[in-house]
Image: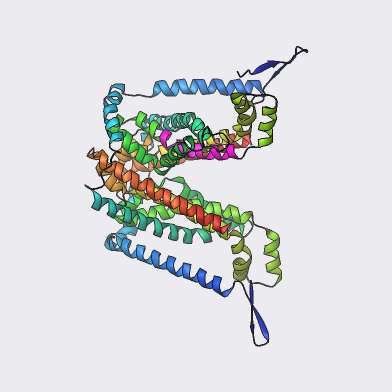
Amino acid sequence: MAVVERGSTKIWHRRERGKQFAIWAVWLLSTAIFVYCWHLISGKTVWFFVMDAPAQAIDLAARMTPPKWSYMNSLWRPIWDTINIATLGTVIALIIAVPVAFCAALNTTPSVLFVRPVALFIIVSSRSINSLIWALMLVAIVGPGIFAGVIAIGLRSIGFCAKLLYEAIEEIDETQVEAIVATGASGPQKLIYGIVPQVMAAFAGISVFRWDINIRESTVLGLVGAGGIGLQLDASISTLAWTQVSLILLAILATVIVSEWVSAKVRHAII
Amino acid sequence: MVDSVTTLPGTGRTWSRPPFIKKPWVRWGVWLAVAIYLFVAITSMEVDWSRVIEGLPRGKKFLLAFLPPNFASRWDSIVDGIYESLWMTVTSTVVGIGLSIPIALGAARNLSHPIVYYSCRGIVALSRTFPEIILAIFFVKLFGFGPFAGFLALSIATIGFYAKLLAEDIEDMDAVQAEAVKATGAGWLQWLNYAVQPQVMPRIIGLGMYRFDINFRESAVVGIVGGGGIGATLLTAFDRYEFDSAAAILLVIIGIVMAVEYSSGIIRNHIK
Protein backbone atom coordinates (compact mmCIF):
# COMPACT_ATOMS: atom_id res chain seq x y z
CA MET A 1 0.00 0.00 0.00
CA ALA A 2 1.40 3.39 -0.88
CA VAL A 3 0.28 6.96 -0.47
CA VAL A 4 1.65 9.54 -2.88
CA GLU A 5 1.49 13.21 -1.94
CA ARG A 6 0.92 15.46 -4.89
CA GLY A 7 0.70 19.07 -3.72
CA SER A 8 -1.70 19.05 -0.83
CA THR A 9 -3.75 16.00 -1.88
CA LYS A 10 -2.82 12.49 -0.86
CA ILE A 11 -3.49 9.79 -3.43
CA TRP A 12 -3.77 6.15 -2.41
CA HIS A 13 -2.26 3.49 -4.66
CA ARG A 14 -2.53 -0.20 -4.22
CA ARG A 15 1.20 -0.86 -4.59
CA GLU A 16 4.57 0.84 -4.25
CA ARG A 17 5.96 2.22 -7.50
CA GLY A 18 8.78 -0.34 -7.72
CA LYS A 19 6.49 -3.28 -7.14
CA GLN A 20 3.96 -1.98 -9.63
CA PHE A 21 6.75 -1.64 -12.18
CA ALA A 22 7.98 -5.19 -11.53
CA ILE A 23 4.47 -6.57 -12.00
CA TRP A 24 4.13 -4.61 -15.20
CA ALA A 25 7.46 -6.01 -16.46
CA VAL A 26 6.37 -9.58 -15.70
CA TRP A 27 3.16 -8.98 -17.63
CA LEU A 28 5.08 -7.54 -20.58
CA LEU A 29 7.48 -10.47 -20.68
CA SER A 30 4.68 -13.05 -20.40
CA THR A 31 2.68 -11.36 -23.13
CA ALA A 32 5.72 -11.32 -25.39
CA ILE A 33 6.32 -15.05 -24.81
CA PHE A 34 2.68 -15.84 -25.45
CA VAL A 35 2.54 -13.82 -28.67
CA TYR A 36 5.77 -15.43 -29.88
CA CYS A 37 4.47 -18.96 -29.21
CA TRP A 38 1.17 -18.13 -30.85
CA HIS A 39 2.99 -16.78 -33.89
CA LEU A 40 4.92 -20.05 -34.23
CA ILE A 41 1.81 -22.21 -33.87
CA SER A 42 -0.05 -20.06 -36.34
CA GLY A 43 2.81 -20.54 -38.79
CA LYS A 44 2.31 -24.30 -38.61
CA THR A 45 -1.45 -24.09 -39.08
CA VAL A 46 -3.28 -24.34 -42.38
CA TRP A 47 -5.82 -21.57 -41.81
CA PHE A 48 -7.93 -22.72 -44.72
CA PHE A 49 -8.81 -25.88 -42.77
CA VAL A 50 -9.58 -23.84 -39.67
CA MET A 51 -11.95 -21.55 -41.61
CA ASP A 52 -13.61 -24.63 -43.00
CA ALA A 53 -14.06 -26.18 -39.52
CA PRO A 54 -17.61 -24.95 -38.71
CA ALA A 55 -18.97 -26.51 -41.90
CA GLN A 56 -17.02 -29.69 -41.12
CA ALA A 57 -18.38 -29.75 -37.58
CA ILE A 58 -21.97 -29.49 -38.77
CA ASP A 59 -21.36 -32.23 -41.30
CA LEU A 60 -19.74 -34.46 -38.67
CA ALA A 61 -22.56 -33.86 -36.20
CA ALA A 62 -25.08 -34.84 -38.87
CA ARG A 63 -23.19 -38.03 -39.59
CA MET A 64 -22.91 -38.91 -35.91
CA THR A 65 -26.65 -38.79 -35.23
CA PRO A 66 -28.51 -40.86 -34.37
CA PRO A 67 -26.19 -43.19 -32.42
CA LYS A 68 -26.31 -46.78 -33.64
CA TRP A 69 -27.94 -48.27 -30.55
CA SER A 70 -27.71 -51.86 -31.77
CA TYR A 71 -23.91 -51.59 -31.54
CA MET A 72 -24.24 -51.44 -27.75
CA ASN A 73 -24.34 -55.25 -27.57
CA SER A 74 -20.73 -55.46 -28.66
CA LEU A 75 -19.68 -52.72 -26.22
CA TRP A 76 -20.44 -54.43 -22.90
CA ARG A 77 -17.32 -56.56 -23.02
CA PRO A 78 -14.98 -53.58 -23.79
CA ILE A 79 -16.58 -51.58 -20.97
CA TRP A 80 -15.98 -54.47 -18.56
CA ASP A 81 -12.37 -54.65 -19.80
CA THR A 82 -11.96 -50.91 -19.30
CA ILE A 83 -13.17 -51.12 -15.71
CA ASN A 84 -10.87 -54.09 -15.08
CA ILE A 85 -7.86 -52.26 -16.49
CA ALA A 86 -8.54 -49.32 -14.18
CA THR A 87 -9.22 -51.44 -11.08
CA LEU A 88 -6.44 -54.01 -11.43
CA GLY A 89 -4.02 -51.24 -12.43
CA THR A 90 -4.94 -49.30 -9.29
CA VAL A 91 -4.48 -52.43 -7.14
CA ILE A 92 -1.02 -53.08 -8.58
CA ALA A 93 -0.08 -49.43 -8.14
CA LEU A 94 -1.19 -49.42 -4.50
CA ILE A 95 0.77 -52.58 -3.69
CA ILE A 96 3.95 -50.97 -5.01
CA ALA A 97 3.16 -47.43 -3.84
CA VAL A 98 2.87 -48.30 -0.12
CA PRO A 99 6.51 -49.38 0.42
CA VAL A 100 7.70 -46.58 -1.87
CA ALA A 101 5.74 -44.04 0.17
CA PHE A 102 7.17 -45.30 3.46
CA CYS A 103 10.66 -45.08 1.96
CA ALA A 104 10.01 -41.54 0.72
CA ALA A 105 8.46 -40.07 3.87
CA LEU A 106 11.05 -38.25 5.96
CA ASN A 107 9.84 -39.72 9.26
CA THR A 108 9.74 -43.37 8.18
CA THR A 109 12.46 -43.71 5.54
CA PRO A 110 15.20 -46.21 6.43
CA SER A 111 17.85 -43.88 5.05
CA VAL A 112 17.54 -40.23 4.03
CA LEU A 113 20.74 -40.38 2.02
CA PHE A 114 20.33 -43.58 0.02
CA VAL A 115 16.77 -44.90 0.04
CA ARG A 116 14.80 -41.65 -0.08
CA PRO A 117 16.31 -40.28 -3.35
CA VAL A 118 15.58 -43.62 -5.07
CA ALA A 119 11.97 -43.55 -3.86
CA LEU A 120 11.57 -39.94 -4.99
CA PHE A 121 13.02 -40.78 -8.39
CA ILE A 122 10.52 -43.64 -8.80
CA ILE A 123 7.72 -41.22 -7.93
CA VAL A 124 8.85 -38.50 -10.35
CA SER A 125 9.49 -40.76 -13.31
CA SER A 126 6.21 -42.58 -12.86
CA ARG A 127 4.33 -39.30 -12.65
CA SER A 128 5.94 -37.46 -15.53
CA ILE A 129 5.11 -40.06 -18.16
CA ASN A 130 1.51 -40.16 -19.33
CA SER A 131 -0.30 -43.51 -19.12
CA LEU A 132 -0.75 -43.45 -22.89
CA ILE A 133 3.03 -43.34 -23.32
CA TRP A 134 3.49 -46.14 -20.78
CA ALA A 135 0.92 -48.10 -22.80
CA LEU A 136 2.72 -47.35 -26.06
CA MET A 137 5.91 -48.68 -24.53
CA LEU A 138 4.31 -51.79 -23.04
CA VAL A 139 2.44 -52.65 -26.23
CA ALA A 140 5.80 -52.64 -27.99
CA ILE A 141 7.23 -54.92 -25.30
CA VAL A 142 4.50 -57.36 -24.17
CA GLY A 143 2.22 -57.07 -27.18
CA PRO A 144 -1.23 -55.51 -27.54
CA GLY A 145 -4.01 -56.38 -25.10
CA ILE A 146 -5.45 -55.77 -21.67
CA PHE A 147 -2.30 -56.89 -19.89
CA ALA A 148 -0.31 -53.96 -21.32
CA GLY A 149 -3.11 -51.61 -20.25
CA VAL A 150 -3.19 -52.90 -16.67
CA ILE A 151 0.57 -52.54 -16.30
CA ALA A 152 0.53 -49.09 -17.92
CA ILE A 153 -2.15 -47.80 -15.55
CA GLY A 154 -0.30 -49.41 -12.65
CA LEU A 155 3.04 -47.82 -13.51
CA ARG A 156 1.47 -44.41 -14.08
CA SER A 157 -0.42 -44.50 -10.77
CA ILE A 158 2.50 -45.52 -8.52
CA GLY A 159 3.90 -42.00 -8.48
CA PHE A 160 0.56 -40.32 -7.83
CA CYS A 161 -0.45 -42.66 -4.98
CA ALA A 162 3.00 -42.76 -3.40
CA LYS A 163 3.33 -38.96 -3.50
CA LEU A 164 -0.01 -38.31 -1.80
CA LEU A 165 0.55 -41.14 0.66
CA TYR A 166 4.01 -40.03 1.72
CA GLU A 167 2.73 -36.50 2.26
CA ALA A 168 0.03 -37.98 4.50
CA ILE A 169 2.64 -39.99 6.38
CA GLU A 170 4.76 -36.89 6.94
CA GLU A 171 1.75 -35.05 8.38
CA ILE A 172 0.88 -37.61 11.08
CA ASP A 173 0.70 -36.72 14.74
CA GLU A 174 4.12 -37.68 16.16
CA THR A 175 2.91 -37.69 19.77
CA GLN A 176 0.78 -40.78 19.09
CA VAL A 177 3.80 -42.57 17.66
CA GLU A 178 5.82 -41.53 20.69
CA ALA A 179 3.15 -42.94 23.01
CA ILE A 180 3.37 -46.28 21.22
CA VAL A 181 7.17 -46.27 21.41
CA ALA A 182 6.97 -45.47 25.14
CA THR A 183 5.15 -48.79 25.70
CA GLY A 184 8.26 -50.54 24.40
CA ALA A 185 7.03 -51.22 20.89
CA SER A 186 9.46 -52.51 18.29
CA GLY A 187 9.91 -50.96 14.82
CA PRO A 188 7.14 -52.91 13.02
CA GLN A 189 4.81 -52.51 16.04
CA LYS A 190 5.37 -48.76 15.93
CA LEU A 191 4.47 -48.82 12.24
CA ILE A 192 1.31 -50.90 12.65
CA TYR A 193 -0.05 -49.38 15.86
CA GLY A 194 1.31 -45.83 15.60
CA ILE A 195 1.44 -44.84 11.93
CA VAL A 196 -0.85 -47.06 9.87
CA PRO A 197 -4.10 -46.22 11.74
CA GLN A 198 -3.37 -42.53 11.21
CA VAL A 199 -2.92 -42.77 7.42
CA MET A 200 -5.58 -45.42 6.75
CA ALA A 201 -8.30 -42.92 5.84
CA ALA A 202 -5.94 -41.00 3.56
CA PHE A 203 -4.94 -44.28 1.92
CA ALA A 204 -8.54 -45.26 1.22
CA GLY A 205 -9.31 -41.78 -0.10
CA ILE A 206 -6.28 -41.79 -2.39
CA SER A 207 -7.14 -45.23 -3.80
CA VAL A 208 -10.67 -44.24 -4.72
CA PHE A 209 -9.52 -40.88 -6.13
CA ARG A 210 -6.94 -42.57 -8.35
CA TRP A 211 -9.39 -45.28 -9.40
CA ASP A 212 -11.74 -42.59 -10.64
CA ILE A 213 -8.94 -40.94 -12.66
CA ASN A 214 -7.86 -44.34 -13.98
CA ILE A 215 -11.33 -45.11 -15.36
CA ARG A 216 -11.05 -41.97 -17.50
CA GLU A 217 -7.53 -42.81 -18.59
CA SER A 218 -8.24 -46.43 -19.41
CA THR A 219 -11.00 -45.43 -21.84
CA VAL A 220 -8.36 -44.15 -24.26
CA LEU A 221 -5.60 -46.75 -23.83
CA GLY A 222 -7.11 -48.75 -26.69
CA LEU A 223 -5.99 -46.03 -29.12
CA VAL A 224 -2.48 -47.46 -28.90
CA GLY A 225 -3.70 -51.07 -28.68
CA ALA A 226 -3.74 -51.60 -24.91
CA GLY A 227 -7.30 -52.92 -24.59
CA GLY A 228 -10.57 -51.46 -23.39
CA ILE A 229 -13.22 -49.42 -25.16
CA GLY A 230 -10.56 -47.26 -26.87
CA LEU A 231 -9.97 -50.15 -29.30
CA GLN A 232 -13.56 -49.90 -30.53
CA LEU A 233 -13.27 -46.12 -30.68
CA ASP A 234 -10.13 -46.31 -32.76
CA ALA A 235 -11.61 -48.94 -35.08
CA SER A 236 -14.86 -47.00 -35.55
CA ILE A 237 -13.02 -43.75 -36.30
CA SER A 238 -10.72 -45.34 -38.82
CA THR A 239 -13.64 -47.01 -40.62
CA LEU A 240 -15.58 -43.69 -40.47
CA ALA A 241 -18.45 -45.42 -38.64
CA TRP A 242 -19.54 -42.17 -37.01
CA THR A 243 -22.83 -43.47 -35.59
CA GLN A 244 -20.79 -46.04 -33.66
CA VAL A 245 -18.38 -43.33 -32.52
CA SER A 246 -21.20 -41.30 -30.99
CA LEU A 247 -22.51 -44.36 -29.16
CA ILE A 248 -19.02 -45.13 -27.82
CA LEU A 249 -18.66 -41.54 -26.60
CA LEU A 250 -22.00 -41.85 -24.82
CA ALA A 251 -20.86 -45.12 -23.26
CA ILE A 252 -17.64 -43.47 -22.05
CA LEU A 253 -19.64 -40.56 -20.68
CA ALA A 254 -21.92 -42.93 -18.76
CA THR A 255 -18.99 -44.97 -17.39
CA VAL A 256 -17.21 -41.83 -16.22
CA ILE A 257 -20.33 -40.44 -14.54
CA VAL A 258 -21.01 -43.74 -12.76
CA SER A 259 -17.40 -44.02 -11.58
CA GLU A 260 -17.47 -40.44 -10.32
CA TRP A 261 -20.69 -41.17 -8.43
CA VAL A 262 -19.24 -44.36 -6.90
CA SER A 263 -16.03 -42.65 -5.81
CA ALA A 264 -17.94 -39.71 -4.33
CA LYS A 265 -20.11 -42.17 -2.35
CA VAL A 266 -17.12 -44.11 -1.06
CA ARG A 267 -15.19 -40.96 -0.12
CA HIS A 268 -18.25 -39.66 1.65
CA ALA A 269 -18.49 -42.92 3.61
CA ILE A 270 -14.82 -42.76 4.63
CA ILE A 271 -14.63 -39.14 5.76
CA MET B 1 6.50 -59.76 16.71
CA VAL B 2 3.15 -58.14 15.94
CA ASP B 3 0.05 -59.65 17.50
CA SER B 4 -3.40 -58.43 16.62
CA VAL B 5 -4.84 -59.81 19.87
CA THR B 6 -3.12 -59.22 23.21
CA THR B 7 -4.07 -60.86 26.50
CA LEU B 8 -3.89 -58.32 29.29
CA PRO B 9 -1.76 -59.79 32.08
CA GLY B 10 -3.54 -60.72 35.32
CA THR B 11 -7.07 -60.07 34.11
CA GLY B 12 -7.49 -62.60 31.33
CA ARG B 13 -9.23 -59.95 29.22
CA THR B 14 -8.11 -59.43 25.68
CA TRP B 15 -7.54 -56.35 23.58
CA SER B 16 -7.32 -56.12 19.84
CA ARG B 17 -6.61 -53.27 17.48
CA PRO B 18 -9.84 -51.55 16.39
CA PRO B 19 -10.48 -52.41 12.73
CA PHE B 20 -10.66 -49.70 10.04
CA ILE B 21 -14.25 -50.59 9.15
CA LYS B 22 -16.20 -50.83 12.40
CA LYS B 23 -19.23 -52.96 11.47
CA PRO B 24 -18.14 -56.61 11.11
CA TRP B 25 -20.70 -57.52 8.44
CA VAL B 26 -19.69 -54.53 6.30
CA ARG B 27 -16.04 -55.43 6.77
CA TRP B 28 -16.46 -59.08 5.78
CA GLY B 29 -18.87 -58.10 3.00
CA VAL B 30 -16.30 -55.72 1.52
CA TRP B 31 -13.57 -58.37 1.71
CA LEU B 32 -15.82 -60.97 0.09
CA ALA B 33 -16.88 -58.60 -2.69
CA VAL B 34 -13.25 -57.67 -3.36
CA ALA B 35 -12.23 -61.33 -3.49
CA ILE B 36 -15.06 -62.27 -5.87
CA TYR B 37 -14.39 -59.28 -8.10
CA LEU B 38 -10.64 -59.96 -8.30
CA PHE B 39 -11.30 -63.62 -9.14
CA VAL B 40 -13.80 -62.80 -11.91
CA ALA B 41 -11.74 -59.92 -13.30
CA ILE B 42 -8.49 -61.85 -13.43
CA THR B 43 -10.04 -64.96 -14.94
CA SER B 44 -11.86 -62.91 -17.58
CA MET B 45 -8.65 -61.22 -18.65
CA GLU B 46 -7.36 -62.82 -21.82
CA VAL B 47 -3.60 -62.68 -21.58
CA ASP B 48 -1.45 -64.24 -24.25
CA TRP B 49 1.34 -65.38 -21.93
CA SER B 50 3.50 -66.76 -24.74
CA ARG B 51 3.49 -63.29 -26.32
CA VAL B 52 4.35 -61.70 -22.97
CA ILE B 53 7.28 -64.07 -22.44
CA GLU B 54 8.41 -63.53 -25.98
CA GLY B 55 8.43 -59.80 -25.27
CA LEU B 56 10.55 -59.96 -22.13
CA PRO B 57 13.92 -59.89 -23.95
CA ARG B 58 12.58 -56.85 -25.82
CA GLY B 59 11.77 -55.25 -22.46
CA LYS B 60 15.32 -55.92 -21.33
CA LYS B 61 16.60 -54.39 -24.57
CA PHE B 62 14.43 -51.35 -23.88
CA LEU B 63 15.82 -50.93 -20.38
CA LEU B 64 19.36 -51.34 -21.69
CA ALA B 65 18.61 -48.66 -24.30
CA PHE B 66 18.61 -46.13 -21.47
CA LEU B 67 22.35 -46.67 -21.03
CA PRO B 68 23.22 -44.75 -23.00
CA PRO B 69 20.15 -43.25 -24.71
CA ASN B 70 20.61 -42.18 -28.31
CA PHE B 71 20.05 -38.45 -28.56
CA ALA B 72 21.96 -38.08 -31.82
CA SER B 73 20.09 -39.97 -34.53
CA ARG B 74 16.77 -38.15 -34.13
CA TRP B 75 18.02 -34.98 -32.53
CA ASP B 76 16.39 -32.61 -35.05
CA SER B 77 12.93 -34.10 -34.72
CA ILE B 78 13.27 -34.28 -30.92
CA VAL B 79 14.09 -30.56 -30.78
CA ASP B 80 11.25 -29.68 -33.18
CA GLY B 81 8.79 -31.80 -31.24
CA ILE B 82 9.78 -30.43 -27.84
CA TYR B 83 9.55 -26.84 -29.08
CA GLU B 84 6.13 -27.50 -30.55
CA SER B 85 5.02 -29.09 -27.26
CA LEU B 86 6.24 -26.07 -25.33
CA TRP B 87 4.44 -23.59 -27.64
CA MET B 88 1.26 -25.56 -27.23
CA THR B 89 1.71 -25.67 -23.47
CA VAL B 90 2.23 -21.91 -23.17
CA THR B 91 -0.60 -20.84 -25.49
CA SER B 92 -3.12 -23.39 -24.24
CA THR B 93 -2.41 -22.57 -20.60
CA VAL B 94 -2.81 -18.83 -21.19
CA VAL B 95 -5.93 -19.12 -23.35
CA GLY B 96 -7.39 -21.79 -21.08
CA ILE B 97 -6.92 -19.62 -17.99
CA GLY B 98 -8.26 -16.56 -19.82
CA LEU B 99 -11.44 -18.47 -20.65
CA SER B 100 -11.59 -20.08 -17.20
CA ILE B 101 -11.58 -16.94 -15.07
CA PRO B 102 -14.93 -15.55 -16.27
CA ILE B 103 -16.42 -19.04 -16.15
CA ALA B 104 -15.09 -19.52 -12.62
CA LEU B 105 -16.66 -16.22 -11.55
CA GLY B 106 -19.95 -17.45 -13.00
CA ALA B 107 -19.58 -20.87 -11.41
CA ALA B 108 -19.02 -19.47 -7.90
CA ARG B 109 -22.29 -19.71 -6.03
CA ASN B 110 -21.65 -16.60 -3.93
CA LEU B 111 -21.11 -14.27 -6.90
CA SER B 112 -23.59 -15.19 -9.56
CA HIS B 113 -27.23 -15.57 -10.39
CA PRO B 114 -28.51 -19.18 -10.32
CA ILE B 115 -29.06 -19.24 -14.11
CA VAL B 116 -25.47 -18.14 -14.75
CA TYR B 117 -24.27 -20.50 -12.04
CA TYR B 118 -25.86 -23.59 -13.54
CA SER B 119 -24.81 -22.79 -17.11
CA CYS B 120 -21.20 -22.20 -16.04
CA ARG B 121 -21.21 -25.42 -13.99
CA GLY B 122 -22.53 -27.15 -17.11
CA ILE B 123 -19.64 -25.84 -19.20
CA VAL B 124 -17.18 -27.06 -16.57
CA ALA B 125 -18.74 -30.52 -16.37
CA LEU B 126 -18.82 -30.80 -20.16
CA SER B 127 -15.15 -29.95 -20.65
CA ARG B 128 -14.10 -32.28 -17.84
CA THR B 129 -15.80 -35.35 -19.26
CA PHE B 130 -13.59 -36.40 -22.12
CA PRO B 131 -9.86 -37.01 -21.87
CA GLU B 132 -7.61 -34.57 -23.78
CA ILE B 133 -6.77 -37.23 -26.30
CA ILE B 134 -10.40 -37.73 -27.43
CA LEU B 135 -10.84 -33.97 -27.81
CA ALA B 136 -7.61 -33.96 -29.82
CA ILE B 137 -8.90 -36.67 -32.17
CA PHE B 138 -11.93 -34.57 -33.03
CA PHE B 139 -10.01 -31.32 -33.36
CA VAL B 140 -7.56 -33.00 -35.70
CA LYS B 141 -10.55 -34.12 -37.81
CA LEU B 142 -11.98 -30.60 -37.85
CA PHE B 143 -8.90 -28.37 -37.99
CA GLY B 144 -6.34 -30.57 -39.69
CA PHE B 145 -3.07 -32.01 -38.40
CA GLY B 146 -0.70 -29.86 -36.40
CA PRO B 147 -0.29 -28.02 -33.12
CA PHE B 148 -3.47 -25.92 -33.52
CA ALA B 149 -5.64 -28.99 -32.83
CA GLY B 150 -3.54 -29.90 -29.80
CA PHE B 151 -3.68 -26.30 -28.58
CA LEU B 152 -7.49 -26.30 -28.74
CA ALA B 153 -7.81 -29.67 -27.00
CA LEU B 154 -5.54 -28.60 -24.15
CA SER B 155 -7.25 -25.21 -23.79
CA ILE B 156 -10.65 -26.82 -23.41
CA ALA B 157 -9.34 -29.42 -20.96
CA THR B 158 -7.79 -26.56 -18.98
CA ILE B 159 -11.22 -24.96 -18.51
CA GLY B 160 -12.66 -28.05 -16.85
CA PHE B 161 -9.81 -28.25 -14.38
CA TYR B 162 -9.04 -24.59 -13.72
CA ALA B 163 -12.52 -23.08 -13.61
CA LYS B 164 -13.72 -25.81 -11.26
CA LEU B 165 -10.93 -25.39 -8.71
CA LEU B 166 -10.90 -21.59 -8.97
CA ALA B 167 -14.68 -21.42 -8.47
CA GLU B 168 -14.29 -23.52 -5.31
CA ASP B 169 -11.65 -21.10 -4.04
CA ILE B 170 -13.85 -18.08 -4.79
CA GLU B 171 -16.68 -19.73 -2.87
CA ASP B 172 -14.34 -20.15 0.11
CA MET B 173 -13.23 -16.52 0.16
CA ASP B 174 -13.76 -14.23 3.16
CA ALA B 175 -17.11 -12.48 2.66
CA VAL B 176 -16.34 -9.85 5.32
CA GLN B 177 -13.53 -8.30 3.29
CA ALA B 178 -15.70 -8.29 0.19
CA GLU B 179 -18.47 -6.56 2.09
CA ALA B 180 -16.07 -3.95 3.45
CA VAL B 181 -15.02 -3.00 -0.07
CA LYS B 182 -18.63 -2.91 -1.19
CA ALA B 183 -19.46 -0.58 1.73
CA THR B 184 -17.04 2.01 0.32
CA GLY B 185 -19.34 2.33 -2.67
CA ALA B 186 -17.23 0.34 -5.11
CA GLY B 187 -18.73 -0.60 -8.47
CA TRP B 188 -18.91 -4.26 -9.50
CA LEU B 189 -15.62 -4.24 -11.41
CA GLN B 190 -13.86 -2.32 -8.63
CA TRP B 191 -15.27 -4.78 -6.18
CA LEU B 192 -13.90 -7.71 -8.22
CA ASN B 193 -10.53 -6.04 -8.55
CA TYR B 194 -10.07 -4.94 -4.94
CA ALA B 195 -12.04 -7.48 -2.92
CA VAL B 196 -12.16 -10.76 -4.82
CA GLN B 197 -9.02 -10.81 -6.91
CA PRO B 198 -6.46 -10.21 -4.11
CA GLN B 199 -7.99 -13.04 -2.09
CA VAL B 200 -7.78 -15.62 -4.86
CA MET B 201 -4.57 -14.43 -6.54
CA PRO B 202 -2.26 -17.01 -4.88
CA ARG B 203 -4.64 -19.71 -6.06
CA ILE B 204 -4.82 -18.26 -9.58
CA ILE B 205 -1.04 -18.38 -9.91
CA GLY B 206 -0.58 -21.69 -8.11
CA LEU B 207 -3.21 -23.47 -10.18
CA GLY B 208 -1.81 -21.86 -13.31
CA MET B 209 1.64 -23.32 -12.64
CA TYR B 210 0.12 -26.69 -11.86
CA ARG B 211 -1.93 -26.68 -15.05
CA PHE B 212 1.13 -25.63 -17.07
CA ASP B 213 2.80 -28.76 -15.76
CA ILE B 214 -0.18 -30.95 -16.67
CA ASN B 215 -0.52 -29.38 -20.11
CA PHE B 216 3.11 -30.11 -20.89
CA ARG B 217 2.65 -33.77 -19.98
CA GLU B 218 -0.52 -33.96 -22.06
CA SER B 219 1.08 -32.15 -24.98
CA ALA B 220 3.41 -35.13 -25.21
CA VAL B 221 0.48 -37.43 -26.06
CA VAL B 222 -1.77 -35.37 -28.35
CA GLY B 223 0.90 -35.93 -31.00
CA ILE B 224 -0.02 -39.64 -31.03
CA VAL B 225 -3.30 -38.75 -32.77
CA GLY B 226 -1.77 -36.01 -34.95
CA GLY B 227 -2.19 -33.02 -32.65
CA GLY B 228 1.41 -31.80 -32.88
CA GLY B 229 4.24 -31.92 -30.38
CA ILE B 230 6.75 -34.55 -29.29
CA GLY B 231 4.19 -37.41 -29.29
CA ALA B 232 4.48 -38.04 -33.02
CA THR B 233 8.27 -38.47 -32.77
CA LEU B 234 7.83 -40.82 -29.82
CA LEU B 235 5.22 -42.89 -31.67
CA THR B 236 7.55 -43.28 -34.66
CA ALA B 237 10.42 -44.30 -32.40
CA PHE B 238 8.33 -47.04 -30.75
CA ASP B 239 6.82 -48.23 -34.02
CA ARG B 240 10.28 -48.75 -35.47
CA TYR B 241 11.53 -50.37 -32.24
CA GLU B 242 14.17 -47.62 -31.97
CA PHE B 243 14.25 -47.95 -28.18
CA ASP B 244 17.40 -45.89 -27.77
CA SER B 245 15.76 -42.83 -29.38
CA ALA B 246 12.56 -43.44 -27.42
CA ALA B 247 14.60 -43.54 -24.20
CA ALA B 248 16.21 -40.23 -25.14
CA ILE B 249 12.78 -38.61 -25.73
CA LEU B 250 11.44 -39.96 -22.43
CA LEU B 251 14.45 -38.60 -20.57
CA VAL B 252 13.95 -35.17 -22.16
CA ILE B 253 10.27 -35.22 -21.12
CA ILE B 254 11.11 -36.27 -17.54
CA GLY B 255 13.81 -33.59 -17.38
CA ILE B 256 11.45 -30.81 -18.51
CA VAL B 257 8.65 -31.96 -16.19
CA MET B 258 11.07 -31.98 -13.26
CA ALA B 259 12.35 -28.51 -14.16
CA VAL B 260 8.80 -27.13 -14.45
CA GLU B 261 7.74 -28.77 -11.19
CA TYR B 262 10.80 -27.48 -9.36
CA SER B 263 10.45 -23.90 -10.60
CA SER B 264 6.70 -23.83 -9.98
CA GLY B 265 7.39 -25.00 -6.42
CA ILE B 266 9.77 -22.06 -5.92
CA ILE B 267 7.28 -19.55 -7.36
CA ARG B 268 4.42 -20.93 -5.27
CA ASN B 269 6.48 -20.72 -2.07
CA HIS B 270 7.44 -17.17 -2.99
CA ILE B 271 3.80 -16.14 -3.40
CA LYS B 272 2.68 -17.60 -0.10
Where is residue B21, by image quadrant?
top right
Which one is nearer the viewer's eye here, A171 or B169?
A: A171
Q: Name, please, the residue furthest toward the right.
A: B11
**For this view, does B69 lie left or right of residue A78?**
left
Of residue B175 and residue B128, the one placed in the foreground of this image is: B175
Specify the farthest residue to the bottom: A7
Left/right placement of residue A57 relative to residue A216 reads left
Q: How is the image coloured?
A: rainbow
Residue under the image location 51 percent in, 70 percent down: A22
For residue B52, say whether it is visible: yes
**Which image quadrant for residue A261?**
top right
Q: Is residue A199 above or below residue B146?
A: above
Residue A92 in the image, given as x and y percentages of width and height? 45, 29
- Say if A75 sits above or below B26 in the image: below
Q: Is residue B136 magenta?
A: no
Residue A109 in picture, x, y percent from top left? 53, 34
Q: What residue do we see at 46% from left, 46% from top?
A: B129
Seen at 54% across and 52% down, the residue is B164
Relative side of A20 to B180, left or right: left
Q: Which residues are magenta?
A: A153-171
- Tell me if residue A59 can be seen: no
The quarter in which the N terminus of chain A is drawn is: bottom right
Quadrant of the frame with the C terminus of chain A: top right
The x and y percentages for residue A160 are 48, 39
Residue, x 45% and y 58% (percent of image)? B96
- Number of marks: 0
- Residue B104: x and y in percent read 54, 57
Task: Name the main secondary structure of what is drawn in magenta.
Answer: helix
Q: Nearer the viewer, residue A179 or B268?
A: A179
